[in-house]
Each structure stands twice: as C-alpha cells, then as structure tokens.
Amino acid sequence: MKNSLIDETVRTVAWSAIERFSVQGFQFVTSIILARLVVPSEYGLIAMLAIFIAIAQSFVDSGFSNALVQKNDSTETDYSTVFYFNTAVSLLVYSVLFLSAPYIALFYKEPLLDLICKWMGLNVIIQGLSVVQVAKLTVLLDFKTQASASLIAVIISGLLGVSLAYFGYGVWALLIQTLVNNLLNTIFLWIFAKWLPKFVFSWNSLKSLFSFGSKLLLSGLLHTIYINLYSLVIGRKYSAMDVGFFNQSSLLARFPSVSLMAIITRAIYPIQCKIKDDDVLIGTSFINYLRMSCYIIFPIMISIAVLSKPLILILLTDKWLPMAVSLSVLCIAYMWIPIMVLNNQILNVMGRSDYFLKSEIVKKIGGILILIITIPFGLTIICIGLFVYNLFDMIIIIYYSKKVINIGYYKQFKTILPFILLSVIMAGMIFFSMQMFSNAYYQLSVGFIIGIITYITLSKLFNIKEFDFLLSILKKIKSSI
C-alpha cells in the first residue's frame, strides 16, 4: 500500500508539476516582460480591482470544486448540477460587478476603473464555465490534460499581451492578456476533457455538495477578502504606484511557495481523500509531505529575500527598486505557506470544513486588526504586519488540524527545524558572497551558485533524507512521464 501510494503520488505530482512549472513559468516570464514595459501605476490599476474580481470568483466556485473531489463517488448528475448552478451564479455575480463598476471607480478616484472593471469582470463568467471540467480531471488525476490546455492558452495570451504592451497599450495589454488566457484555457478544457453537461439538475445533489462546499465558500471568501484587502486599503490610503509596488512584490514573493504548493496539494488531495480512513497512513503521509515541502521551499524563499535588490534590478529595472525591502520581508512572511496549506488541506481531506471555517474566522479577525494597526506606517510596516499574521495563522490552523490527525505544534516544529537552520546558514553564505561584488549580475549569479552549493553540502553533511529522496523522486518522474 505504501509503495503504491508513493508511485501514485509521484505520477500525479509529475504532471501537476509539468503543468504548473510550464504554465506558471511562462506566466512569470510574461509578467516580468510586461513589468518592464508598463509603469507601476498601470499595474496598480489592475491590482485595485483584484479584491472585487476575487470575491466574485469565490461565489462562482462556491466550494463545489473541492466538494466534487472530496466526494469519492461523484455522479454525472452531481457534475451537471454544479455546472448549471455555477453558470447561473457567474452571470448574476457579473451583473452585480458590472453595476458596481462606477462606484468602484469613484471609491478609488480613478475614472478609468469603471470601464476596466466591466471588461475584467468577464473573467468571472469565463472561469465559471470550466470549474467542473477542472474538478473532473482532478478526480481522474489527469493533470496532463490540464497541462496541455493551460500551456497553450498562456503562450498565446502571453505573446499577445507582450506585443500590446510593446506598442504602448499599457493597462489594456494587461487586461487583454488576462481575458484571452482565461478564454482560451476554458475553450481547450472543454475540447480536451470531452465532457458535456447532461440535461439534468438535482436539488438533492446541490444540497449534498453545498453542505460541504458552503463552509469552504465562507472560508474562501474570508481568505480572499483579507488577501486582497491590502491592495484596496493601500489604493485608498496611498497611490496607484504604491499599489503597484506592493502587488508586484507580493506576486514575486508568493510565486515560488504558492506555485510549488499548488503542484503538491492539487496532486495529493485526491490521494489523501482515498486514504483518509487509515489514521496511521494519513498521519505519516502528512509528515512526509510537510518535510519535503519545507525542504524545497524554505531555501528558495530565504534566497530571494537576501537577493531581492539585484533580482529586481535585473528582472524589473531600477523603476521597481523601491519595493526591494518589501519583497525581502514578504519572502520571509510567505515561506511558511507550506505549513499553513498542508494543515488547511488536511481539514478538507477529513471532511472537517467546519473546523476550516472556524479557523478562518479567528485568523482573519486577527489579520484585520494587524492591518488596521500597520496601515498608517507605510508599505514596509504593512509587510512586517503580514509576517506577524502568517505566524498567527500557523498557530491557529495547527490547533484545529491537531484535532483530526493528532500532530501538534511540537511535532511539526521539530519536523521543519532542520530546514530552517540549513536555510539560515545558506542565507548567511549568500549575503557574505554578495559583499564581494558591486555589480547586480555578479551578486545574483554568484549568490545563487553559492546558495545551491551550500544547501546541497549541508544536506549531505547532516544526512538529510529528503535530498536523497528528492533525487529518487526525480528519477521516478522522468521514467513516469
């Protein structure tokens, strides 16, 4: 059972990784090119709308995607019911967003946001049409199909967005790139998934799925509002340029941890759902996933924090340099994402969306208080507040996850401590190597090489089993593709 679980995990993680690395990698490169072609204030205009679009998208999904995956015996009636419900809700939500656009523009005192919001809101309808296809492919552990659809869409839309930005279309280049990406991805998912809704709708099915999904909806709304509240408040208190700096530093800081955890969690979620009744196996797999996630993500996040200045100068040019300190602080804040995500997911796996909701309520109350306290003191203090919030988040979510898998603070901290120490030592070596050069290219390249050599050497010296396991996993992935 254990070996088959490892093989299945490797296979699913492989295609999940291919999709995420190819898609997110191309998107990342595209975003860097766009950032060089447009000014921070234009990025800020799009970021100002993020909270409204994200809230709208949360209503469209309604937690049904996770509910369909968590329910091991979902039927065609379930899928069709969710599709029709999502379509109706997406149209309703877009209508509200459309009518609210003038007031959103008035709130920010940015008249152009009225028109931008009406066009940007179409993403809600477009993405709502593919929720079921994604859920169905995830249940089947078919990440290869998702990879194909996403990659084609992101390449075409990315090239279009960069071309428009090059010819001076500014904020409209960012808007069109996003719309075309979502539209093409949805079209290709329909083509590749080969699934069509049946002419059936079941209220019983809707109620059954909603009993689980509604709590995830409320939890997701709280998290979405909180995460995007920063752009809203900064946009109101400061300027579009400040929003651009914050949004871009947050994007760069979150990219490694969020992308890697998306690969891991999306692949292991359906697998964990299958073994959720085996207390020993689910607990062991949780610790193994936690160790591997932190072993990979901690050094990446700390390295970016140390190398933030030369990284920004090379990737984004000096017009983005004022965000260097914010980027460093946010990297340290978001390096804890693996712990939070895996503890959150285990609650969903075990069907305890009630615990998930309770934890979100407590965490977001604390998070909003921290934001209120830090908002008058500028971007750096706001970012430090985010670091404090993430520590608070970990404390709360581990408290609730311990109730379902009996793995508490001490055991989880003991699990990740070696990787914290290794990453800190590596960061020190990178920092000292940077002092030998004044050129940003030398600082980044030498720091990167020193960091890798230091981390691998320490892993071998202290016999960190994740290093050898990672090498064997890479071999398995290569043979399974």
Image (cartoon, grey):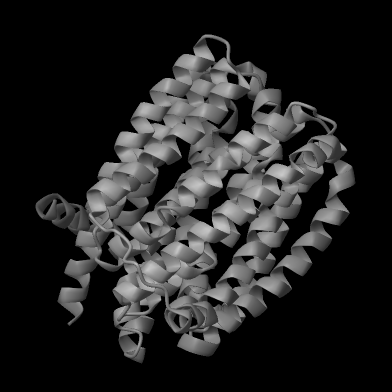
Q: Nearer the viewer, residue 185 or 401?
A: 185
For the question of whether residue 338 can be seen, the reply is no
For the question of whether residue 427 can be seen, the reply is yes
Place of residue 17 in the rendered image (x, y in percent of width and height, measured from the top left): 30, 50
Q: Nearer the viewer, residue 39 or 332?
A: 39
Place of residue 210 in the rendered image (x, y in percent of width and height, measured from the top left): 52, 77
Q: Residue at x 44, y 68 (%)?
A: 82
Above or below 448: residue 98: below
- Image check: 403 left or right of 43? left
Total labels drawn: 0
Q: Nearer the viewer, residue 32 or 390?
A: 32
Place of residue 32 in the rendered image (x, y in percent of width and height, measured from the top left): 50, 26
Above or below 142: residue 377: above
> Which residue is farthest top?
167
Q: Residue at x 49, y 65 (%)?
A: 85
- Image check: 281 left or right of 407? left
Q: Quadrant of the N terminus?
A: bottom left
> Which residue is farthest front?
199
Above or below 340: residue 90: above
Quadrant hosting residue 472: bottom left
Place of residue 240 in the rendered image (x, y in percent of width and height, measured from the top left): 76, 29
Above or below 60: residue 272: below
Q: Nearer the viewer, residue 169 or 475?
A: 169
Q: Residue at x 40, y 35 (%)?
A: 450
> Which residue is farthest right?
376
